[in-house]
Image (cartoon, grey):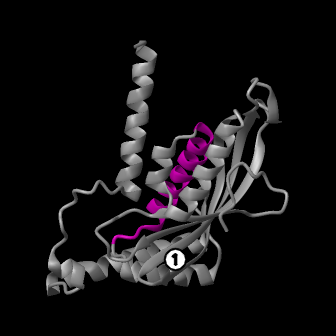
Amino acid sequence: MPAELVIYALITAGLIFWLRSILGTKHGDERERPVAFLSGEDSPQDESKGDQKISNAVALIEELNEKPKGNMAIAGRSAEQDLIEIAGLERDFDVYKFLQAAQDVFVYVVESFADGDRETLQDLLGPKVYDAFDKAITEREKAGETMETEISAISKSEILEAHTENKHAFITVRFHAEERSVTKDKDGEIIYGHPDKVTQMRDIWTFSKPLRSSDPRWLVVETREDLDGDNESIPNTH
């Protein structure tokens, strides 16, 4: 194997490991959490530490809502209060780490969809969203079409809302991104896009995870375009 391919493989493996360390991944052989964690019955010392974690998480949420940081933001007071509710239930929640990881997932999902990488998609998407992506990939394969997509930048990731339902947390994020995308027919002729043209992409995705679960993953459970006529390079599952 050429040396440059070995280096590329090592870099890719490192990125996946870092990403999964933040959003998490389930391997099927995790150790069970202590009973106190599952029941929410902490000792006085643990409760004190838990309260401090919540206070820290709330401070970060209020800070980001007051002033966007880099390409991260929260869309107003309502979204801020929704996130604070989740932070009270998910004591390790960090809004900055969540948004950074969400951006990474966005890139992985969009580019993996173009590559037809079902294994990566299945690890990052909820069942409903994965089925929609899998169907679109299958239709593309049957037509003999190929797709090449690269996210060149994410200019903004903004939390629009959050809520809890049926013991799950949900956080909805709007992404503003720049991408290059080309779709080719079975003869290799371009039928959509341009390899050198950067297009603007605005998508709204919802992430979800079970509250206080031993499974740490935030899966993508809904995707939709933000504007009519926006670049529809991925399935709309709304």
Is 67 situated left or right of 61 in this image? right
> Number of numbered discs present?
1
* Image point (72%, 48%), residue name: 233
Please report the bounds of the magenta region as a residue range.
92-115
* Residue ID at (59%, 42%): 111
Residue 191, above or below 86: above
Image quarter of the N terminus: top left
x, y percentage for residue 160?
63, 73
Residue 13 lies, in percent from the top left, at 38, 36
* Residue that label 1 marks: 62
- Magenta span contains residue 126: no
Q: Nearer the viewer, residue 87 or 19?
A: 19
Please state if 44 lies on the left or on the right of 232 as rendered: left
As rendered, which of 54 and 183 lies closer to the eye? Answer: 183
Query: Residue at image x 45%, y 45%?
Result: 119
The quadrant of the picture occupied by the C terminus is: bottom right
Can the viewer see residue 48 in this picture? no
Q: Is residue 45 above or below residue 138?
A: below
Residue 200 placement, left or right of 74: right
Q: Amino acid at mark 1?
A: Glu
Task: Place residue 4 in its image quadrant.
Answer: top left
Residue 109: in sight, yes or no? yes
Circle 1: element type = helix
Q: Position of residue 47 (x, y in %)?
A: 22, 84
Q: Is residue 102 magenta?
A: yes
**Crowdedness near tag 1: few (<14), some (14–19) or many (≥20) residues, C-alpha within 10 Å:** some
Pinpoint residue 197: horizontal percent, then vertical percent: 80, 35
Residue, x 73% and y 28% (percent of image)? 186
Residue sitting nearer the eye, 90 or 229: 229
Majority SS type along the magenta span: helix
Q: Residue furthest top?
A: 2
151 above or below 54?
above
